[in-house]
Image: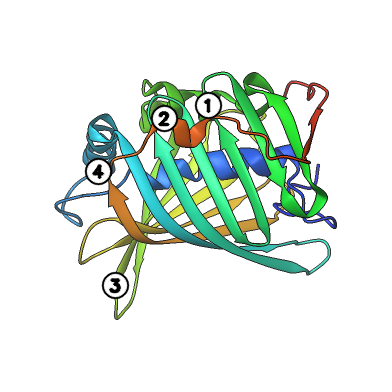
């Protein structure tokens, strides 16, 4: 399967939505206090503690995808909002669209098409990796084989962690995290699918535990917009 984030009609594929959800992993790494002399397991423990202390996130993001087969790329940007236990909203400004998940539903709103594509939650987050992070029970060390890569030289200096999923049928073959040395926050995440397609997201203006209302993640159908229920996606 070719996991691309935006298809020819500027709509998400379901595989791409999983990529978006996996990107939340990066945003939980918000305040590593030391690096370099610590072991990988110590760093992973700090990641989990930060996740446990995180209630909500607001961030700007920019995104680039690159297709290995076609040598093509796309770009996008917008704002992301996350509220525990399981609410995510991606507001895309370029192209204009919105992807939201709450406890009961998941949907993609494409204003240009005046359509909301509605999915059952389990259709989108049926990956064990994604479920682990949404539940708050996932330990990175239990889900990924993690290693430290040489830091990316600066300025500014960027530390790097490589995550290889242990799930044999994972839609993600590799995840690389870039961590800012000055703040010990993740500022970029790159995911690679089994076909070698790259999805890279850079985060800026990250706010941890901002005040977010549950109503931001509720389904409201604008006048004149149709709702299309999508068929179930085969389990992976």
**What SS does tag 1 mark?**
loop
Kindly indicate the quadrant of the structure image that contains residue 67.
Answer: bottom right
Q: Earlier in the sequence, mark 2 or mark 4?
A: 4
Are the residues flagged by discs 4 and 3 in contact, CB closer than 8 Å? no
- Spatial distance from mark 1 to mark 4, Cα to Cα? 30 Å
Percent from the top left, x then y, of residue 207? 29, 52
Q: Residues within 10 Å of mark 2 (few under 14, many from 20)?
A: few
In this rendering, which labeled residue sits more in front, label 3 or label 1?
Answer: 1
Residue at position x 41%, y 26% from top? 142
Residue at position x 47%, y 49% from top? 80
Q: Residue 102 has which mark?
A: 1
Are the residues flagged by discs 1 and 4 in contact, CB closer than 8 Å? no
Front residue of 180/43: it is 180
Q: Residue 43 has which mark?
A: 4
Are the residues flagged by discs 2 and 1 in contact, CB closer than 8 Å? yes
Residue at position x 57%, y 18% from top? 104
Q: Earlier in the sequence, mark 2 or mark 1?
A: 1
Kindly indicate the quadrant of the structure image that contains residue 181.
Answer: bottom left
Q: Residues within 10 Å of mark 1 (few under 14, many from 20)?
A: many
- Quadrant the C terminus occupies: top right
**What SS does tag 3 mark?**
loop
* Residue highlighted by disc 3: 157
Q: Residue 115 has which mark?
A: none
Q: Earlier in the sequence, mark 2 or mark 3?
A: 3
In this rendering, which labeled residue sits more in front, label 1 or label 4?
Answer: 1
């Amino acid at each position: 399967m070719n996991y691309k984030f935006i298809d020819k009609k500027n709509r998400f594929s379901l595989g791409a939505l999983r990529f978006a959800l996996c990107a939340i992993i990066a945003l939980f790494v918000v305040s590593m206090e030391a690096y370099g002399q610590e072991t990988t397991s110590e760093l992973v423990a700090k990641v989990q503690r930060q996740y446990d202390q995180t209630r909500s996130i607001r961030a700007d993001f920019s995104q680039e995808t690159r297709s290995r087969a076609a040598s093509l790329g796309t770009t996008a940007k917008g704002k992301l909002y996350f509220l525990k236990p399981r609410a995510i909203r991606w507001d895309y400004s370029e192209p204009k669209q919105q992807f939201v998940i709450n406890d009961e539903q998941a949907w993609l709103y494409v204003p240009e098409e005046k359509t909301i594509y509605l999915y059952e939650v389990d259709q989108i987050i049926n990956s064990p990796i994604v479920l682990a992070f949404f539940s708050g029970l996932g330990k990175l060390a239990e889900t990924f084989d993690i290693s430290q890569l040489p830091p990316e030289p600066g300025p500014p200096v960027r530390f790097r962690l490589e995550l290889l999923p242990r799930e044999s049928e994972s839609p993600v073959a590799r995840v690389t995290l870039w961590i800012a040395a000055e703040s010990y926050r993740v500022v970029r995440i790159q995911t690679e699918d089994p076909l070698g397609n790259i999805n890279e997201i850079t985060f800026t203006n990250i706010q941890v535990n901002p005040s977010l209302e549950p109503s931001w993640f509720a389904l409201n159908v604008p006048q004149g917009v149709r709702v299309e229920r999508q068929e179930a996606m085969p389990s992976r």
